Image: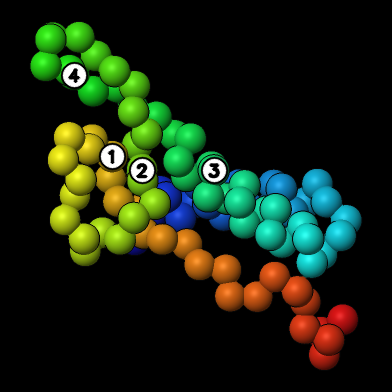
Amino acid sequence: MHDEAAYLFVRGFFRSLGCSARLGEDYRSAFEQGKSAVTEKKRRVRTRDAGSDEVPYFTLSNPEDPPLPNCHSFAAGVPVMFMAEPREDYA
């Protein structure tokens, strides 16, 4: 199954994590970078006045919720970070 939003998130997360050296704080930062990678992808849509506008391709929202009015973005889900600190038994 192809999941472009997940791919963008993982790529942003690991790129950020690969550039860091501190684990606890860096997981949080990498998580934020992963979310940003998803929302930074843009696409062009037509406007009512026959022009065009650039909008986010994805929005971080639940795909099961009704879409927002006039929202041209696709729901990519809501990322949740469960643990930012490494467990002691893995250190």
Calculate the distance from the C-alpha at mark 4 to the C-alpha at mark 3: 24 Å
| SS category of the residue bearing label 2 | strand
Where residue 38 sits in the image (x, y, percent)? 47, 44
**Earlier residue among tags 2 and 4:** 4
Q: Nearer the viewer, residue 8 or 63?
A: 63
Mark with earlier residue (3, 2):
3
Whether residue 7 is visible: yes
What's the CA distance linking mark 2 and mark 4? 17 Å
31 displayed left or right of 4: right
Residue placed most toward the observer, 76 or 48: 48
Residue assigned mark 4: 46
The three-letter code of the residue at mark 2 reads Phe
Instruction: Decide which of tag 4 and tag 3 comes sooner along the chain.
Output: 3
Residue 73 disc label:
1
Please name the residue that numbered disc 2 is placed on: 58
The residue located at (17%, 35%) in the rendering is 70
Q: Earlier in the sequence, mark 1 or mark 4?
A: 4
Separation of residues labelled 1 and 4 (CA atoms): 13 Å
Q: Secondary structure at mark 4?
A: strand
Residue at 20% across / 45% down in the picture? 68
Q: Residue 87: image x %, image y %?
A: 77, 83
82 lies above or below 36: below
Q: Which amino acid is tagged 1?
A: Ser
Evaluate if marks 1 and 2 touch, with contact meaning CB atoms under 8 Å apart.
yes
Residue 90 percent location from the top left of the image: 81, 84
Instruction: Specify whether residue 11 is in view.
Output: no
